[in-house]
Image (cartoon, rainbow, N blue to C red):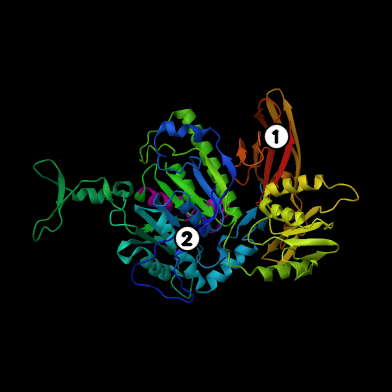
Amino acid sequence: MTEKKPIKITPAKGRPMLTWVGKRPLAQVTAFPAQHIETFDPSGHAARRATKRDLWADWPDRYPRGGLLFHGDNKEVLAHLLANGFRGKVKLIYIDPPFDSGADYVRRVRLRGATGSAQIEGEGYTLGEQIQYEDIWANDNYLQFMYERLLLLKELLAEDGSVYLHADYRKDHLLRCVMDEVFGHDRLRNEIVWFYPRGGDSERQFNRKHDTILFYSKGDDWTFNYDAVLIPYTEEQLARFDQQDEHGRFYWNVNPRGERTKTYLRKPGVGEYDVWTIGIDATQIQQIGYPTLKPEKVLERIIRASSSPGDLVLDCFIGSGTTAAVAQKLGRRWIGCDINKGAIQTTAKRLQTIIQEQIAAHNNNGQNKLVDTEDAPPEPAQLSFTVWRVNDYDLQIQHNEAVNLACEHIGIQRTRTDPFLDGVLGRNLVKIIPFNHPLSPLDLDGIRRELDARPEEDRNITVVSLGKELAADAWIEDWNRLRKGTNAVNRIEVIELRTDPRYGKFFEHKPASAKVKITRKGGQIQVEIEDFVSPTIIERLAQQEGVLKAQIEDWRAMVDCVMIDPAYNGEVFNVALSDVPARKEDLVKGSYSLPAAEGPTTVVVRIIDMLGEEILVTEQV
């Protein structure tokens, strides 16, 4: 998108000022480019939107007009947004950062199917993410972490915009002090108490059944849609308005014994209070798989109150995607971000389902007017979104320590004198990719340049990484294709590691595999998935306590969703077909038919298993 460059940040000037060990101002931050990796635009929305309504006049030209979903450390993503035209453009920010540790976001995964009951613990954070969050939430780095991100968020917020920060008893008192410093104590509009009557019963203390939502505005003239969050009058309240004046307006005397004060019935209800009783939807938590999932009704109230249809909403701890989901349903534009790949996948699936439902509703009932009422939801601001990756994470991890652990596990002999390569494994040279990002073509280009500078080097290269981008496989395949035969040199192989927090070990990753038949009949492309195996799922089931033998009768129980691009361009995956079952009891279809483009085309089938691992099957037809 752009070259990396420094972005200046306005210093915090609010009072009081909280002090912590290692506190430092954020005067500037480096903005890195983003890689466009996926597009979901089933109706060709992005190309037509400008003719419908000028919602996008302030939208940077370098981005397609639709939702934006970023995978990366949110500090770097926020800096990227500032550098690319979003400063002062966001009307509403909602964030729900981890309350105490990254473990808040570890998913529980249940295999698909009507009779499926086996559950496994999904991937939490990668090694880099774990080190980041465990270090931050264990000490004062937590406050610096939030301080820096709040400073960046303030720069993105419009002058009439608002920010809502969701917290619980562990951190709300500290976060309020930091918010006072960043936004000013006079910008606090509400300390909202969300009461959720659900859960266990404590016999040692009062039951903890509420969270706190801190509502701050950026300026003195902020957006608040009073009518959008009115509480309807009860019959008892309406009965109080038992008198009429000469104009026929109903009122009641608030203080009939003293001075007569008239209160008129002007609205269909009273303004919402700052204590909300909204239950937690246990079914939705189980269905989506995030234990910290917030009810959509909480976000509905916030989004209706502090934004209007067409406004831009941002959540940089997107998690399961509730903010983006509700924003999409209420006709707002949205940007989401998360460091966890599973969160990005969950959000993308959720948005795909919602957009497909909106397209179907439009086709059946005609387009809704752009009005925000309960009985007539607003027209969607977009019917498409794109996914981006910012790889240059600033994770503050102890890379050398992590490399030592990996080398010990694999049996790599370290080479301390080589400025580029990390050691040898047998006769192979070893390059360990920093564990704060997956193996990418950029990393492989770096290896190629290094080998070009060593023309006498004839050994093969073993690359060790935690995760890898889909495009890396194609890069390696092309590289090795030119290096076949007994005298081949500099072939590249990859050992992809995962870190399993439950079992406390590294293990060599055995990738999933699929048998897929892709054919062309006339003007249609036929895709038939005949089999799929995820060794990781099978291994975890075998290790799961109480499970003696893992038996999976239908391969579809291991598959979360299937997406197909019938005309892949080699760079961006355009989702033309998305099979995302609505319920965990449902299975993917496995058999698909799509219109075929004229002439030869490259068909790519993406299969994502229940743990979030992706595989691509490519065929030219």
Q: Confirm whether residue 196 shows in the render.
A: no
Q: Marks 2/1: CA distance?
A: 51 Å
Whether residue 570 can be seen here: yes
Residue 22 is situated, as x and y percent measured from the top left of the image, at 49, 75
For the record, the magenta segment spans 280-304
Q: Is residue 427 left or right of residue 38?
A: right
In this picture, residue 49 sits left or right of residue 454: left
- The quadrant of the rendering that contains the C terminus is top right
* Front-lying residue, 238 or 341: 341
Q: Which residue is rendered at x = 57% and y = 71% of the image?
A: 135
Q: Is residue 218 above or below residue 1?
A: below
**Residue that numbered label 1 is attached to:** 602
Residue type (three-letter) at the residue carrying disc 2: Arg
- Counting labels gives 2
Image vertical order of residue 19 relative to residue 105, above or below: below
Verify whether residue 292 appears in magenta. Answer: yes
Question: Dot 2 corresponds to which residue?
Answer: 198
Assess disc 2: are there few (<14), some (14-19) or many (≥20) residues with their C-alpha within 10 Å of its C-alpha: few
